[in-house]
Image (spheres, rainbow, N blue to C red):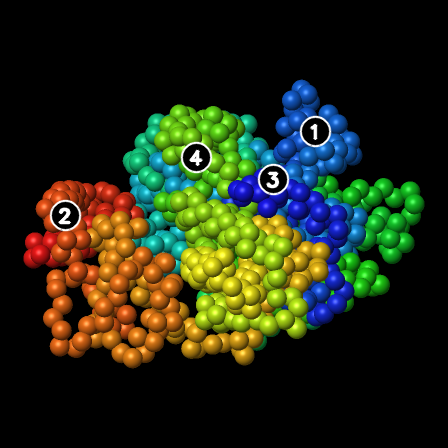
Amino acid sequence: MDKTYQPQAIEPRLYQNWEQQGYFKPSGVGSAFCIMIPPPNVTGTLHMGHGFNQTVIDILTRYHRMQGNNTLYQPGTDHAGIATQMVVERRVNAEGKTRHDYGRTAFIEKIWEWKSESGDTINRQLRRLGTSPDWSRERFTMDQDLSAAVVEVFVRLHAEGLIYRGKRLVNWDPVLHTAVSDLEVVSEEENGWMWHFRYPIADANGAATQEYLIVATTRPETMLGDTAVAVHPNDERYQHLIGKQVLLPLVGRLIPIVGDNYADPEKGTGCVKITPAHDFNDYQVGKRHQLALINIFTKDAHINNTAPEPYRGLERYAARKQIVADLDALGLLAEVKEHKLMVPRGDRSGTVIEPYLTDQWYIDLTCETQADGRPGGKRALAQPAIDVVAKGEVRFIPNNWINTYNQWMHNLEDWCISRQLWWGHQIPAWYDEAGTIYVGRNEAEVRHQHQLAPELTLVQDPDVLDTWFSSALWPFSTLGWPNPPDQALKTFYPSSTLVTGFDIIFFWVARMIMMGQKFIGDVPFRDVYIHGLVRDAEGQKMSKSKGNVLDPLDIIDGIDLETLVKKRTSGMMQPQLAQKIEKATRKQFPAGIEAHGTDALRFTFASFATAGRDIRFDLQRLEGYRNFCNKLWNAARYVLMQCEGQDTGLDDSLPLELSTADRWIDSKLQTVATEVTDHLDNYRFDLAAQALYEFTWYEYCDWYLELTKPVLSKQNTNEAAKRGTRRTLVRVLEASLRMLHPIMPFITEEIWLSIKDLAGKTGKSIMLEPWPKADQTQLDATAVAEIEWLKTFIMGIRRIRSEMDIKPGQVLNILLANWSANDQALYASNQAVVQSMAKVGQATWLAKEAIAPESATALVGEMQILIPLAGLIDKDAEIARLSKEIEKIEKNLIGVESRLNNPAFVEKAKPEVIETARKQAEEQRLALGQLQGQLEKMQAL
């Protein structure tokens, strides 16, 4: 082993070997364990959310592989309809062309070309993260087999009346010209305006009167499509007007005044303009009152020809400006107020999304029974998915996410599954010239099934299916469905665990459950582990606009400051923020980010994986785990130094003695093996990481390695004792490496390959070794009690040295008071260790009646360790040092307390800043009390 731990030197080499040797493939032996990758976008690059998600998945995968399961981690990517089409369109635009210049077929060929060149970026990055999927089974949602599954599901659902085509309101992206899902819409608060308009009440003849209803809107242009004004049916101000009409300004259309609970008497004037074709809430009001749906927009959000002549062809914001001016000229603009509002923008285009009335394909999720008596979507798809969770056939971890799931499932809308794109699964529906729709697996099947004449022209629907449609089939389409001979489906469906974020519980998790139940007759997975978001150290969501994004690969391999600044400020949607982000980046990372290696990052993620909560990613904690890697590496080098070329107890016929320390560490090993296994079985990755960290760092490295030195010294001639200690050194390290391996695959493999022969292991890789199982017969309460006594004794003396500023190497004579016979026996058996590790000279056992001089004291149970202070330290110098330190802390404490006592600070500062200040004050008060206690002791000497 090299002198220093260099992850960049070992990680690529080890991964390449693992993959070449086929170690990631299912063994074919044991009970099945399967976990599906949440397919990342083929356009994607690794971000911290991926890193966290993939670390958790790979921990489970490696753990179950070592448990002897027939383990499959199924990899693959999603075709990402909108994102991929945008990427390739930009390349085409750079050539001075559009996709329409190529035509659909040629453009799709361009996308496949791009995928072959650049579409595996994220998979290369996943390899760098150390994940261990069976890459030979890699799938892509546009693969031929998966595309066949998509068509099969569509055709079957349509045949059962569960897919239909209808005109409904959707989220419309006027730049991309497609419907988008709610997940692809980002709503953020922005500054805007609220316009208040006067709508004249009409008389019996339809003429405007001098009475008005005042309505308020943030989107004046939509008034062109108003078909009602709503008031609350119990609002006494307007009850007498319900059933009458207003004359819609600028348009001249008479529209009814309706009574509806959607109108809130406490909000504004209590009157609400209703535009059913351009607002989701208004759409529901329109359905309740059978209102007309008037679409006023073109697909690119210009005013269409249903509007009055002066506004036709105007872009929506130009129309807004003109409409406000015209209403003002007519004296119908009551007032304008500044207003903060949530603005929905497309996550890809950045444009404001419009609710838009258009023909789309839907999966029915709301109908109980169809008109012909067949089950509707609610009974056939939604209710079975609700039932399996209620019965516990699918388990959410943490359990509280069931509430989120049920909230979605009990408030379903029909699922819009069509998108106006070229890239994706083209909808298997054909139209004749009369507009008749034919659905089938291909055109030949359609013609045969419906006995259509060869000369009849059929045109396939140009739309493609929502990406989430194919993703919903992922658990079984990747395993070969609907191909009956595929053994993988029989072996690995249902999968064992799904690891995902809370934000797609409905969009992905629920839909997979619906489709799995419908087409396979079983749930797609047994457990759903929900993890939180990765936020920055201040708890802020990571985003390009905030300039706080961290790239996992930059943490693994390091990045210099200039490259980091360029990375954070290039390609921004809000370039005006670049200067601010550059300044913050230079302040936070003056030397860039140094390389930490994959294992330190994975251990950090594991330590943060706490019961579904969001995590605050802290680089200081990451540095602590890099130090942990160094500690483990150095411990292994010590073991090799002591054991290479030596007898490590492989020959059972030779005599072997185990010291108390040997029996203690072996007993602690059994305890930690039980704990870690239990934590991983219950998805408490944080507790597993903590238990492994504490055992490895504190028990094995800090204590056991030191306790072996007297036994292994040249002065000790007891070969049986040396043999026992070497065997324990190696075997405990080897077992610890196996437990650490799922979290830290690289360093554990590298060390294990170096020490495996010494431990009597013949395997080719640590990942193929069995998971350590606790041996209860190795638990030794006596040894544990003795070593805990020893640790308390040594730490007591070390604490006194630290508090009294006594040099670590200075030998101390000690007094022992209030001792027992057991204390004397324990001291006698551990005297050499105490003298070596605590630098103790003479120990004097005081009689009960003896009066001890002024001393620093430590307790070991009821026994007191006394270190007389007279003559040990320079009293005047120590008083001066303590007084200076007290003065410094008092000054700092006054400053912190003054901030906390300042109402302006408490009102304006962020909660996390206030909490940090409070912690600082508490820490300083504690330190002050300790120093004042020490000063009093010094003055009493």
Q: Which residue occupies 72% across, 70% down? A: 30
Residue type at mark 2 is: Asp
Q: Residues within 10 Å of mark 1 (few under 14, many from 20)?
A: many
Picture layout, residue 859 above or below residue 155? below
The one of 266 and 504 positioned closer to us in this rendering: 504
Q: Which residue occupies 48% across, 39% down? A: 550
Residue type at mark 1 is: Arg
Residue type at mark 3 is: Ala
Picture layout, residue 940 above or below residue 5? below
Upstream in sequence: badge 1 or badge 4: 1
Q: Residues within 10 Å of mark 3 (few under 14, many from 20)?
A: few
Mark 2, residue position: 874
Upstream in sequence: badge 3 or badge 1: 3
Mark 3, residue position: 9
**CA–CA distance between discs 3 and 4?**
31 Å
Q: Which residue occupies 84% across, 63% down? A: 485
Question: Which of the two discs, 3 and 2, sits closer to the camera?
Answer: 2
Secondary structure under the numbered disc 4 in the rendered image: loop
Secondary structure under the numbered disc 2 in the rendered image: loop
Q: Residues within 10 Å of mark 2 (few under 14, many from 20)?
A: few
Question: Which of the two discs, 1 and 4, sits closer to the camera?
Answer: 4
